[in-house]
Amino acid sequence: MRVNTKSLLAAGAVAVVATLGLASCSSGDSGSEGDASSSGTLTVWVDAERVDALKGAAEAYTDKTGVKVDLVGKDNADIKDDFIQQVPTGKGPDITMGAHDWLGELSTNGVVAPIELGDSAGDYLPVAIDASTYEGTTYMLPYAVENIAVLRNADLVPEPATSFDDMIAKGQAAGLTQPFVVEQGAEGNPYHLYPFQTAFGAPVFGSGAEGYDPTDLQLGNSGGEQFATWLGSQGKNGTGVFNTDIDGDIAKQAFIDGTAAFWLTGPWNVGSAIDAGVNVAIDTVPSPTAEVASPFAGVKGFFVSAESKNKVAANDFLVNYIGTEDVQLELFEAGNVLPALSAAAETASEDPIVAGFAAVGAEAVPMPAIPAMGSVWQYWGIAEADIINGADPVATWQKLTSDVQAAIK
């Protein structure tokens, strides 16, 4: 495998310490769950589906440094909670795989250590670095970027839409009564509606040099009320484009059956559409305004335990081995999610489906990882569902904002 030599040079003495000092430590038995006190071993918790993708990097690191890398497959649903519980006791891994929106919780619990990317920070997609940084400090080595986009049935509609209204018009011209589907459900789904909200200039929070600012709630600005008004016009008492009766399964079936030509969803659903014989094209999210419709980006990566006795080796392994094109492509092949490393993303984007999601990802914004975001999710979807179902848009949106502000305080 190729080692990130630029970062090694930048790390200088750090790499020497990792190679000479840690390699001479006695190796200990880390157990099935791992033990951060085992100084001769790096224990890495990994999504069970991606263990094989990291074996080459683990073996290369051991061959180079003498430090054993113990890959422990974990159920993705358990990794975060187990990590938070075990790190303060000195147990658990040196490194864990996870998602960037865990950062607020991990940082608040004091279980993660900063990562030094050095010059290699410039080698990653900007949104990946932004998402890996919390309050001005980088805590995650990113490996994948995931976002939604519009899947288009290219046999029904050969050309992408130039705007939201054009999308509906193109579908209707193809003889469809429901040209566009997006999952909502009884409690709404603000994640999928967020690109339309951003097109009205209404992000959830303002941001600065250190990322999202929880004291700067932008949800209720004038753009938010404009979005709410537009959302109501597309709901039950308007065009009916948005419908809370449509959940994920119904939206998928409509697209697969050809009764809908456009489907706003993520890469996790592309395989089903292709397997069903749909000629799928990937488009940017058509905006209802003159501004870009920016979806959320979710970034996946690796965190170093705050209690690891091997922080230098952990940083070295992540930056100089996981942060290489071949390893990030191995992870891509295991999960089919756009690599975070720019060179790997470019290679993966030779596939037109991946390239389509990458183009939308370039316009995406990181999902806020700050703890205050929990107060938003609590009320957001319900408010949007009410608006879609005919509630007064402005009054409902104002109440949403007030509820969120009160919950944050």
Image (cartoon, helix red, strand yellow):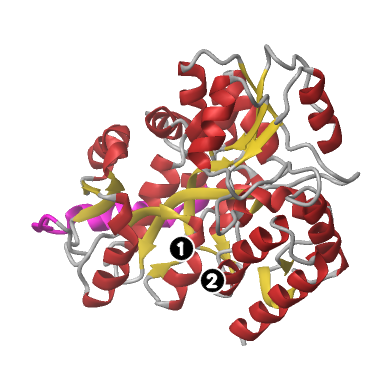
In the image, 315: left or right of 130?
A: left
Looking at the rendered structure, the secondary structure element under dot 2 is helix
C-alpha separation, residue under disc 2 versus residue under disc 1: 11 Å
**Image position of 2 with respect to 191: above or below:** above
Task: Identify the magenta region.
Answer: 10-32
| Residue 17 in view (yes/no) | no
- Of 384 and 298, nearer the camera is 384
| Residue 307 percent coordinates (x, y) | 30, 71
| Residue 260 percent coordinates (x, y) | 65, 26
Q: Does the magenta segment cover residue 23?
A: yes
What secondary structure is the magenta-colored segment mainly? helix
Q: Does the magenta segment cover residue 96?
A: no
In the image, 316: left or right of 278?
A: left
Which residue corresponds to mark 1? 102
The amino acid pointed to by label 2 is Gly
Q: Residue furthest front?
A: 237
| Residue 17 percent coordinates (x, y) | 33, 57
The amino acid pointed to by label 1 is Trp
Which residue corresponds to mark 2? 374
- Of 406 and 122, nearer the camera is 406
Residue located at (50% from left, 32% from top): 269
Nearer to us of marks 2 and 1 is 2
Q: Quadrant of the C terminus?
A: bottom right
Of the numbered discs in the image, which one, if any, rests on residue 14?
none
| Residue 256 percent coordinates (x, y) | 54, 23
